[in-house]
Image (tube, rainbow, N blue to C red):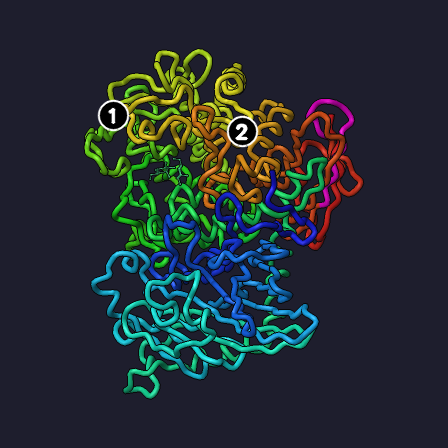
């Protein structure tokens, strides 16, 4: 069953009924001002940091779900009938409802009683504001007398405090209303120099800024008294709950359309120029006035929207494919790339499943996210790498998270997740291959954000490996620390205290529990560092890290092999995890996928065997589960993994993030059919037809799909902000299609299904546009490349001579 359809031409997903199984959201904003926007007008906005600079409120875990939003009410002044054209919050019956989620904008349209309303929401590039462009059309045969009431509920900036500290916050709210613009200025009189504003392109018939005056006592957003009576109260909030609502009356002739533009924005004033006049307490509005004036003019709104579209044309234009599979095409060309930009911008902070008040940017998450966006925004990737690296500790270890606003490591979480440092190397290698910008390795970067501690980025990479070398366990494998990629495999925690964090409490010295996953990751990271050293002329380092990689690979084969698959870990007692010897959790995906991907056991058949075991024990029609059998009880020595009921999350859920490791592993075995089959099982678009089972957005990946042990096998959770986005994008674009940046050029080495006779890719790489067409002549994966008419040796297209902007590559497979 479906709740909409893909409009690939427009690059939109069109939701055709508002009561999707769960809120289906989109994001607006792509630089510093962001918002979550659901198909029913729900969601909130923030500037840079979802916790510390929240503009509007969201209500967590509310019923109905998805409450708090950008609501416009339409009132028919003749009949008194009123409704929400976005369905929520009044839930009044609508005709012709649709929500078009596009690239950085959404348009919600509907009709009731002959009045059509269509609202396009977006954030212009380079602005810290959002626009709601409302078009109201009278499709009746007679004139209509209509009222529009807008509404937002302001958050008092720190979303955590706002949701908890009522004894203070119910007394601090402050606003100003001037020339029809509502200014939210809570705490501006003291230490803040920023405020929010909410303006409207029309003359107002009234406004409200105090929630209770607008809604009425004992009423909710579904029936505000001001809307019901068609009359704003012109209230000025003092404490309690500041809101913004504007009342506009429109008389529309038959067939007449009108556009009304609302702007909700964030603005900062100079600390020394906060007030006007200077010694008053009145907000200085001079610096924001030109911005407000600009978007009162619809022509400026339209050109801002065109610029946003052009921005996405450019980003998505970097990689475009035409293949025999429409699902893969629309994911790669549109939605998966778009999701990668969302994870770049939001990391794991704000979604329907992340409150925006918890996590900042994750060290390992952000590095992995790079794999999915580095080709679209290389200069911002560079900045991101340097920010992440600056939080690294001098030991080579890492803070697990850092706050985007302060860019400082998060002390509440701390470090000692022993996989973290390796991901920095993986991220930097991806950046270097994409851009060829080796100057980044010389950039001076602090440790622990402490000025004076700067060392070249290259030194940071070496410390990442050193950190692992300083933490090797009894079998010669890396010690796991608090956890590795699997945050819930907490082998040093041994928690028996309810509510204690499994990730940050440790009761063991950590000198025994080892991770085969980190070992596999280290095989890769040491090899990447070796390659980086080789290309930058550091021959000694190159051979040192190559040997380290090979040695670790040998150690895995010796102590990390269980006969038919790779072990997952050794626990604090030195017992195996992920072994035939275990009663539950006998086989895990991470070590199979990552070791295969890193090339461990590639030659002697171990990798093949491990992947066959994955197919046999872990693969389901909805994707590959994380481990089997699921843990049926709590294992104090394993930690959080065994706290989840069987089939959910890390306890044998389909953790989509690591399915692509198996996909890449199959590609390395030359098995295009298996790789693409696994790809399709979790591909959101391919699952659109079972939206009633999957339940989340069919245009983006979710972190998890319930595993076969769960009662709701196939049901997705935690959509949008997941490493799944980058890894799947990386797996399909670089490994299955095989168009892969290398230091010496662009590799073309597809491993696609045998039935595919041809496909085409357009790839912009280091400023050159590669027009690549692949045709199959035989069953295998051997490739012959013809570059601009000349057959070349090997599968790497070297950079063209200076000045050449486009290259034609013909690849013959077979
Ligand atoms: C979440 C975390 C990620 C972790 C994964 C597995 O996706 O963001 O860091 O690797 O869970 O536990
Ligand atoms: C990861 C896991 C999640 C766990 C969390 C703890 O995000 O996916 O299951 O609760 O880490 O921080």
User: In terms of image quarters, where does ligand 2 lie?
Assistant: top left
- Where is residue 436 drawn, in percent x and y? 55, 47
From the image, tell me which residue sits under label 2. Answer: 622
Q: Residue furthest right?
A: 789
Q: Does the numbered disc 2 mark a residue whose Cβ is under 8 Å from ligand 2? A: no
Q: Is residue 304 above or below residue 457?
A: below
Q: In this view, does 403 lie above or below 291?
A: above
Left or right of 477? Residue 86 is right
Magenta stretch, residue numbers:
771-783
Q: What element carries label 1?
A: loop
- Mark 2 is surrounded, within 10 Å at the Cα level, by few (under 14), some (14 to 19) or many (20 or more) other residues, namely many
Q: Which of 613 and 113 is in front in this view?
A: 113
Q: In which quarter of the image is residue 102?
A: bottom right
Give the foreground label among 1 and 2.
2
Image quarter in which the N terminus is found: top right
Circle on res. 636: 1
Q: Earlier in the sequence, mark 1 or mark 2?
A: 2
**Is residue 331 shown in magenta?**
no
């Amino acid at each position: 069953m479906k709740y909409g359809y893909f409009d690939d031409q427009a690059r939109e997903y069109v939701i055709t009924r508002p009561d999707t199984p769960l809120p289906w959201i989109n994001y607006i904003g792509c630089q510093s001002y962001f918002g979550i926007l659901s198909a029913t007008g729900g969601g909130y906005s923030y500037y840079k940091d979802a916790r510390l600079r929240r503009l509007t409120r969201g209500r967590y875990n509310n019923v109905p779900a998805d409450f708090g939003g950008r609501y416009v009410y339409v009132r028919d002044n003749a009949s008194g009938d009123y409704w929400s054209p976005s369905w929520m919050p009044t839930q009044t019956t609508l005709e012709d409802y649709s929500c078009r989620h596009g690239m950085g904008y959404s348009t919600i349209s509907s009709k009731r009683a002959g009045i059509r309303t269509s609202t396009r929401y977006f954030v212009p590039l380079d602005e810290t504001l959002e626009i709601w462009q409302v078009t109201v059309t009278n499709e009746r045969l007679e004139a209509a007398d209509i009222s529009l009431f807008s509404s937002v509920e302001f958050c008092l900036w720190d979303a955590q405090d706002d949701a908890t500290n009522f004894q203070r916050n119910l007394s601090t709210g402050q606003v100003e209303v001037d020339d029809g613009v509502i200014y939210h200025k809570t705490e501006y009189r003291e230490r803040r120099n920023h405020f929010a504003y909410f303006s409207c392109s029309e003359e107002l018939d009234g406004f409200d800024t105090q929630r209770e005056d607008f809604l009425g006592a004992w009423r909710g957003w579904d029936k505000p008294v001001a809307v019901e009576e068609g009359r704003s109260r012109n209230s000025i909030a003092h404490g309690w709950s500041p809101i913004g609502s504007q009342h506009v009356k429109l008389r529309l002739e038959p067939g007449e359309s009108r556009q009304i533009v609302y702007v909700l924005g964030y603005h900062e004033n100079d600390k020394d120029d906060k007030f006007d006049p200077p010694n008053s307490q009145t907000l200085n509005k001079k610096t924001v006035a030109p911005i407000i004036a600009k978007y009162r003019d619809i022509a400026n709104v339209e050109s801002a929207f065109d610029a946003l579209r052009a921005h996405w044309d450019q980003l998505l234009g970097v990689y475009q494919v035409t293949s025999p599979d429409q699902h893969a095409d629309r994911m790669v060309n549109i939605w998966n790339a778009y999701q990668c930009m969302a994870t770049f911008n939001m990391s794991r902070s704000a979604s329907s499943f992340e409150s925006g008040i918890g996590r900042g940017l994750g060290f390992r998450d952000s590095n992995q996210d790079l794999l999915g966006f580095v080709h679209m925004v290389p200069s911002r990737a560079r900045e991101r790498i340097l920010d992440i690296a600056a939080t690294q500790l001098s030991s080579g270890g890492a803070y697990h998270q850092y706050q985007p606003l302060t860019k400082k490591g998060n002390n509440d979480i701390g470090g000692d997740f022993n996989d973290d440092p390796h991901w920095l190397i993986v991220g930097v290698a991806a950046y270097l291959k994409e851009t060829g910008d080796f100057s980044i390795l010389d950039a001076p970067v602090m440790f622990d954000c402490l000025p004076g501690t700067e060392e070249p980025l290259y030194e940071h990479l070496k410390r990442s490996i050193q950190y692992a070398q300083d933490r090797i366990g009894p079998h010669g494998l890396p010690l796991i620390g608090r956890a590795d990629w699997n945050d819930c495999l907490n082998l040093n925690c041994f928690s028996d205290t309810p509510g204690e964090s499994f990730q940050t409490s440790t009761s063991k010295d950590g000198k025994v529990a080892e991770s085969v996953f980190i070992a596999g990751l280290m095989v890769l990271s040491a090899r990447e560092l070796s390659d980086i050293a080789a290309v930058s002329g550091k021959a000694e380092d190159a051979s040192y890290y190559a040997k380290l990689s090979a040695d670790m690979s040998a150690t895995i084969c010796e102590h990390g092999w269980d006969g038919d698959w790779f072990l997952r870990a050794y626990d604090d007692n030195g017992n195996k995890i992920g072994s035939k010897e275990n009663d539950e959790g006998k086989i895990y995906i991470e070590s199979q996928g990552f070791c295969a991907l890193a090339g461990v056991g590639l030659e002697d058949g171990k990798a093949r065997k491990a992947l066959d075991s994955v197919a046999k024990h872990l693969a389901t029609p909805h994707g590959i589960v994380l481990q089997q059998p699921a843990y049926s009880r709590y294992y104090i020595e394993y930690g959080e993994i065994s706290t989840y009921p069987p089939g959910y999350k890390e306890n044998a859920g389909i953790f989509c993030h690591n399915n692509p490791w198996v996909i890449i592993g199959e590609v390395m075995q030359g098995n295009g059919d298996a790789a693409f089959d696994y790809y399709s099982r979790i591909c959101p678009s391919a699952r659109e037809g079972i939206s009633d089972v999957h339940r989340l957005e069919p245009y983006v990946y979710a972190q998890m799909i319930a595993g076969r042990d769960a009662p709701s096998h196939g049901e997705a959770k935690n959509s949008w902000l997941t490493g799944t986005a980058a890894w799947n994008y990386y797996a399909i674009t670089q490994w299955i299609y095989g168009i892969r940046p290398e230091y010496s050029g662009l590799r073309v080495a597809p491993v696609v299904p045998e039935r595919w006779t041809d496909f085409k890719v357009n790839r912009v790489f280091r400023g050159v546009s590669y027009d690549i067409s692949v045709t199959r002549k035989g069953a295998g994966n051997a490739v012959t490349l013809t570059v601009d008419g000349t057959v070349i040796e090997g599968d790497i297209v070297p950079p063209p001579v200076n000045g050449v902007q486009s290259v034609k590559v013909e690849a013959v497979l077979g």
